[in-house]
Image (cartoon, grey):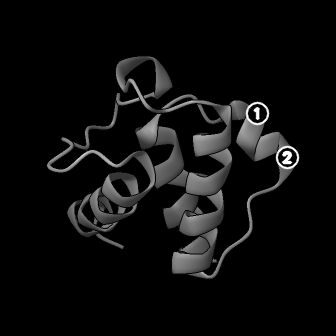
Amino acid sequence: MDREIIKNDLKGIFEEVVSTPNIEITETLNAELVDRWDSLTHLTMIAKVEEFYDIKFKLKELIGMKNVGDMMNLIISKKSA
């Protein structure tokens, strides 16, 4: 999978979940950088990403996920398997 395509996909999901149009998706983006990204928003975002890509994250993977780049790496690894 192409990282730019994933970024574009995630942009739509993030804009919907955090109600922030034109959010810039970078690999270093995390909850500390987005005002409306709280724990409930995070869970919603994870659920939408899992649904969109038809994947499931393991708890260990979620704990290790520190930013969008980590999420992208997991998406790529799960879709390549």
Label disc, if present, on residue 19 of the rendered structure? none
At horizontal 62% and vertical 55% (from top left) the residue drawn is 44
Circle 1: residue type: Ile
Instruction: Point out the image quarter for the N terminus.
Output: bottom left
Q: Secondary structure at mark 1?
A: helix
Answer above or below: position of 27 versus 51: above
Q: Residue furthest top?
A: 32
**Circle 2: element type:** helix
Which of 3 and 57 lies nearest the eye of the viewer? Answer: 57
**Residue 73 coordinates in the image, percent (x, y):** 50, 51
Residue 53, relative to residue 40: is it above or below?
below
Q: Mark 2 — residue? A: 59
71 sits to left or right of 61:
left
Q: In percent of the image, x 25 and y 69: which residue is there?
A: 5
Question: In this picture, is 63 found above or below 43?
Answer: above
Give yes or no for contact between labels 1 and 2 (Cβ–Cβ under 8 Å).
yes
Q: Residue at x 54, y 65 (%)?
A: 49
Residue pushed farthest bottom? 54
Horizontal relation, residue 52 to residue 65: left or right: left
Between the C-alphas of marks 1 and 2, the distance is 6 Å
Tell me the crowding category of disc 2: few under 14, some 14 to 19, or many 20 or more residues within 10 angstroms, Cα based.
few
Name the spot of residue 12 as percent of width and height, x first: 30, 64
Q: Quadrant of residue 80?
A: bottom right
Q: Amino acid at mark 2?
A: Leu
Residue 66 image-quadrant placement = top right
User: Residue 39 location, x and y as percent?
Assistant: 67, 33
Q: Give the residue pinned by disc 1.
A: 63
